Image (spheres, rainbow, N blue to C red):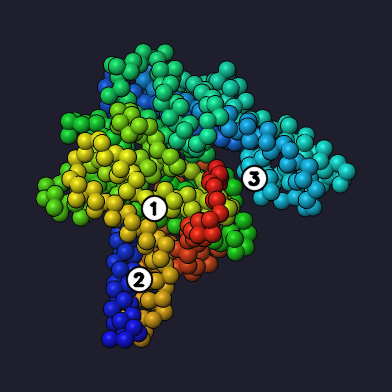
């Protein structure tokens, strides 16, 4: 056979069959997971004396605009008094960077006009546009003075949290502020700093490491997220029910993150359309991949299927660091939260150990990305963290695992296959769709069905589910009603949906290009 015949009669049918199968699977998974979230939230919490100890960790870096809201929301969560605390971890890295950035102000003030993007890292993301407009409105001779004034007047996150800790909001849970020295690292470093100081948070409530560690969960949130007020009760009920059923505490309880919180609108024009499309894709991934994998893992663990079958069905779970509750002994056994992505690494390592993983029935709301730079940075970082599952396997090789060596090898291979599908799947499937007619009319029909299900049909369904999913999250009473993401130009969003997988390639391929050219590609804070 010629190369053209191999492509048309073997490669194209295989790719189109995979496209259709994946589209059907994702649509079913989205529907089932959304229905589960909408119908499973109201579980009876355990008695107050039976609930586990919980410590809510909020790592913050340049979160001045949302710190007060995050603290108010988390300290107002429902839970029996004296069994949980909220810990905010700020970092000296913010102050060190601030000192270094002050020397750049003169050069920035000389830019005419100054853009919000040029101020990223110097001010909180939500403030950059306002600061740029103020500097641009000043006379040329006053621009540097105005920029200096605004820069010096901006409090650090630590300043704001320290003031809140000195006069905490009237919530149910106590607030503890920890400030990490400038030791480098990312979010994982802040979380591990807090893990070493849990006694400062829970000790005043009567918690003791030697007595209560086995009944303690560490719950991680992003500062711009808003958890359901019933979250901690739901986590406690899930942990208690799992322990009663299996005799073991779940190592991970994942509360699902839904990008439905709209504090900032999408920009106008094509960029806004791209970002709105990514929002839908994030929602699709959250339901159809992240939550679906946790639930599938949980079902397989409880099934009576032979291990030889479960080995090929078992997924690699992607933990999400916004709503991730980890059993304290489990995270200690891992040596703490891993860099560079504490959530993905934790999910991978616990999956490779065959740990008990389950999902919470209430969701947490966070913001979608409203700037392309943050989106590309996120995808590049996720690709880099996913690229070496063998390193996660090596990191936990010394720990006892419920999985056989072949089962762990299958998980590693599955993750590599997922990474390859992410990087090359969209271009290959697009080429197969373009070639479908020449492969035969039947394959053209398969291509059309796969394309419609993968894009417009799933997007339309997600847009219909979004209001109900948002309404199902009951915010803490101190916040009141929460704004919901609702992008304009829905017909354009549906029509452009088949192109969205290509948007997710920009960050990873930019990273690959930088590495090929031997240019250092660092990762800063992934800001929304």
Using the rendered view, name the quadrant where residue 288 is placed.
bottom left
Which residue appears at 50% of the width and 37% of the height?
186
> SS at mark 2?
helix
**Mark 1 vs mark 3, CA separation in Å:** 28 Å
Q: Quadrant of the N terminus?
A: bottom left
What residue is pinned by disc 1?
A: 387
- Which residue corresponds to the image point at 46% horizontal and 20% vertical from the top-left? 174
Tell me the distance, in whole angstroms, between the alpha carbons under discs 1 and 2: 27 Å
The label number, if any, that marks residue 108 in the structure image: none
Asked if residue 97 lies left or right of residue 350, the reply is right
Give the residue number, with chain letter if any, for mark 3: 120
Q: Please name which of the two marks, 2 or 3, marks the residue nearer to the observer.
A: 3
In this rendered view, identify the residue nearer to me: 229 or 517. Answer: 517
Camera sees residue 461? no
Residues 44 and 226: in front is 226
Q: In the rendering, at what x and y percent does residue 508 appear?
A: 48, 57
Secondary structure type for disc 1: loop
In contact (CB < 8 Å): disc 1 and disc 3:
no
Query: Foreground mark, 1 or 2?
Result: 1
């Amino acid at each position: 056979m010629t190369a053209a015949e191999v492509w048309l009669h073997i490669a194209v049918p295989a790719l189109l069959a995979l496209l259709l199968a994946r589209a059907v699977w994702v649509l079913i998974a989205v529907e089932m997971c959304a229905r589960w979230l909408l119908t499973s939230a109201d579980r009876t919490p355990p008695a107050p004396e039976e609930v586990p100890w919980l410590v809510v960790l909020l790592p913050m870096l340049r979160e001045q605009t949302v710190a007060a809201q995050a603290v108010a929301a988390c300290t107002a969560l429902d839970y029996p008094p004296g069994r949980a605390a909220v810990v905010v971890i700020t970092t000296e890295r913010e102050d060190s960077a601030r000192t270094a950035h002050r020397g750049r102000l003169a050069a920035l003030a000389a830019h005419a006009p100054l853009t919000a993007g040029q101020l990223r890292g110097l001010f909180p993301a939500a403030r950059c546009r306002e600061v740029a407009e103020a500097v641009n409105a000043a006379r040329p001779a006053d621009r540097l003075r105005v920029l200096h004034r605004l820069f010096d007047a901006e409090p650090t996150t630590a300043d704001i949290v320290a003031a809140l800790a000195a006069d905490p909001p009237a919530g149910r849970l106590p607030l503890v502020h920890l400030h990490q020295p400038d030791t480098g690292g990312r979010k994982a470093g802040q979380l591990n700093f807090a893990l070493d100081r849990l006694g400062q948070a829970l000790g005043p409530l009567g918690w003791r490491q030697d007595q209560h560690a086995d009944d303690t969960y560490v719950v991680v949130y992003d500062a711009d997220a808003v958890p359901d007020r019933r979250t901690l009760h739901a986590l406690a009920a899930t942990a208690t029910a799992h322990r009663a059923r299996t005799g073991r505490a779940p190592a991970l309880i994942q509360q699902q993150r839904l990008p439905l919180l709209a504090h900032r609108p999408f920009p106008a024009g094509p960029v806004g359309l791209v970002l709105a499309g990514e929002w839908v894709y994030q929602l699709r991934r959250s339901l159809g991949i992240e939550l679906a994998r946790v639930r599938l893992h949980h079902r397989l663990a409880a099934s009576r299927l032979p291990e030889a079958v479960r080995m090929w069905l078992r997924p690699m779970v992607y933990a999400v660091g916004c709503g991730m509750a980890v059993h304290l002994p489990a995270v200690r056994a891992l040596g703490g939260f891993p860099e560079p992505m504490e959530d993905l690494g934790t999910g991978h390592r616990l999956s490779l150990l065959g740990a008990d993983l389950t999902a919470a029935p209430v969701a947490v709301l966070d913001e979608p990305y409203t700037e392309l730079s943050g989106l590309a940075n996120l995808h590049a970082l996720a690709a880099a963290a996913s690229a070496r599952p063998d390193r996660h396997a090596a990191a936990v090789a010394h720990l006892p695992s419920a999985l056989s060596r072949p089962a762990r090898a299958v998980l590693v291979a599955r993750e590599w296959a997922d990474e390859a599908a992410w990087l090359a799947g969209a271009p290959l499937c697009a080429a197969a769709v373009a070639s479908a007619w020449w492969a035969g009319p039947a394959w053209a029909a398969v291509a059309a069905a796969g394309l419609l299900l993968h894009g417009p049909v799933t997007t339309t369904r997600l847009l219909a589910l979004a209001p109900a999913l948002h309404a199902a999250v009951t915010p803490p009473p101190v916040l009141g009603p929460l704004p919901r993401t609702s992008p304009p130009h829905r017909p354009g969003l549906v029509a452009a949906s088949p192109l969205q997988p290509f948007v997710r390639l920009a960050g990873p391929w930019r990273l690959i290009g930088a590495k090929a050219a031997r240019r250092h590609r660092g990762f800063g804070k992934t800001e929304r």
